[in-house]
Image (cartoon, rainbow, N blue to C red):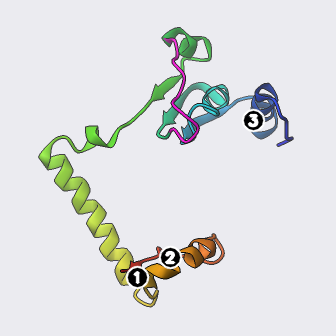
Amino acid sequence: MKSSSTPAGRRSACQAEITGGVGVPVVYDSIGQSTFDISLDCLARRGLMVCFGTASGPTPPIQAMQLAVKGSLFLTRPALADYIADPEERAEVAGANCSTRRIRANQDRDQPAIPLEDAVRAHHDMSPVAVSVPSVFSV
């Protein structure tokens, strides 16, 4: 994608160069305020945008008609509380999470625990090349 310092340039690059002008079916935006409009404009007709973070600030307000004008888009802002409000749902999510952790722990037994005082070094080592398994810190 050609770099551009303007949001309009980034939108054009996203739609024209990456997707041939079609747009993408789904955008997961964890940044928030500074990327909201760009992410929305990169969607294909009837695309879905999932906003789940506010690293650059809260997302701006949007009029529902904007979603129709931009191609009958869908926009959602999920919150964990709504997925674990019911005790049965909470138990299911917790069970799935614990099962995943047990599986990973069994697969990664040869991955030694990192002493907490080495957290800075471990952070620098956490690149796609250096770390291929979850890191565990010992306290």
Residue named by callout 3:
14
Q: Which residues are magenta?
A: 54-63
Asked if labels 2 and 1 touch by Cβ distance under 8 angstroms, the answer is yes
Q: Amino acid at mark 2?
A: Val
Badge 3: residue crowd in 10 Å (few <14, some 14–19, many ≥20): many
In the displayed orientation, state which residue is furthest to the front: 117
Q: Is residue 130 above or below residue 19?
A: below
Badge 1: residue crowd in 10 Å (few <14, some 14–19, many ≥20): few
> Is disc 3 placed on a helix, strand or loop?
helix
Q: Is residue 106 above or below residue 48?
A: below
| Marks 2 and 3, the one that precedes in the sequence | 3
| Marks 3 and 1, the one that precedes in the sequence | 3
Q: Residue 64 or 56: which is nearer the viewer?
A: 56
Residue 36: image location, x then y, percent: 60, 30
The residue mark sitting in front, 2 or 3, is: 2
Of the numbered discs in the image, which one, if any, rests on residue 123?
none
Residue at figure coordinates x 62%, y 76% from the top left? 125
Residue named by callout 1:
107
Residue 38: image location, x then y, percent: 67, 29
Main secondary structure type of the part rendered in magenta: loop
Gap between marks 1 and 2 measured at Cα: 9 Å
Q: Amino acid at mark 3?
A: Cys
